[in-house]
Image: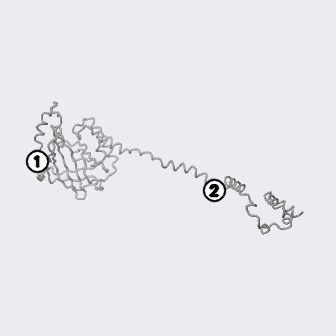
Amino acid sequence: MASISSLNQIPCKTLQITSQYSKSTSKISTLPLTSTNFPSISVKEFTNPKPKFTAQAKNYDKEDEWGPEVEQIKPSGGGVSVAEEEPPKEEPSEIELLKKQLVDSFYGTNRGLSASSETRAEIVELITKLESKNPTPAPTEALPLLNGKWILAYTSFSGLFPLLSRGTLPLVRVEEISQTIDSEAFTVQNSVVFAGPLATTSITTNAKFEVRSPKRVQIKFDEGIIGTPQLTDSIELPENIEFLGQKIDLSPFKGLVNSVQDTASSVAKSISSQPPIKFPISNSNAQSWLLTTYLDHELRISRGDGGSVFVLIKEGSPLLKP
């Protein structure tokens, strides 16, 4: 009976096992409770996986030290989905806004020739603001930024106004005014391209420059070039033109133009093969200085020795697009 009482202290699961082997109950009561005495009883019959699994799950939720960290993984998954969203677009900087406003103010001014006094005042104010925020305080120490072709967008230099006024003549316009700088060779090339219905040509001046201060360069012109007219194979004639306030219909001339089309093509090939005309520049106006007051990768503001202002945009810049 003492052995049976000791068996009664075993959990209920072992009582179910003893009932399964009721024929050998007497033997169990006389033997010590060891694993060797039950060779035919599997471990599975002593343990119930399902209750044990449930108990482990409860301990994991309440006591397992990794539980709280597992719960923290859930909100981090939400963070990943937020990171995959497109980031908000950056707002343009104050300098970018000023540059856009400045270029917009040039519209309809014909590089400054036709600008009203109010427009000029607005342009001067924007230029002054940009100069105060110049990202390149020593332009001559950042010569690679000066390299390349710069397109003139605006000037207050009255010496260019007679040249710009040629664009008001019938069928003739100033197509482009540019300045090309080679900082390694210390050369500057200024060029004006004229365009008409029959041909395009250019006038170019070549110069050397010397650095005189962090912002100032001295320029000396040494050569002028009149480019060979490049005649077009197909003559384009507008429907009408305005001259001295009158609109002139050019349609009667179209038949004449078509009749000389073949002749113009042969003449174009002949003239275009001729070399340009070069001439030396050696007068007192062959030198000047230029002060760069604003410079970045796409915009340059310079002031001449007569107080004139030049605003130039780097070729290929989006600022040149209307």
Q: Is residue 30 above or below residue 233?
A: below
Task: Say which amino acid is labelled 1.
Answer: Ser
Q: Quadrant of the C terminus?
A: top left
- Contact, CB < 8 Å: mark 2 with mark 1? no
Q: Quadrant of the N terminus?
A: bottom right
* Residue 265 visible in image: yes
Looking at the picture, tell me which residue is in the foreground, 167 or 14.
14
Quick one: label 2, few (<14), some, or many (20+) residues within 10 Å?
few
The residue that label 1 is drawn on is: 266
Looking at the picture, tell me which residue is in the foreground, 66 or 222.
66
Q: Dot 1: what SS? A: helix
User: Position of 293 compared to 273: left or right?
Assistant: right
Question: Which residue does the image show at 26% across and 53% down from the upper left?
Answer: 148
Residue at the far bottom: name it: 36
Q: What is the spatial separation of the Cα atoms under label 2 and label 1, in whole angstroms?
A: 89 Å
Q: Dot 2: what SS? A: loop
Residue at the far front: name it: 23
Task: Say the numbered circle drawn on residue 66.
Answer: 2
Looking at the picture, tell me which residue is in the foreground, 92 or 285.
92
Percent x, y of residue 239: 18, 34
Task: Say which amino acid is labelled 2.
Answer: Trp
* Residue 279 visible in image: no
State which tag comes first along the sequence, 2 or 1.
Answer: 2
Percent x, y of residue 290: 23, 50
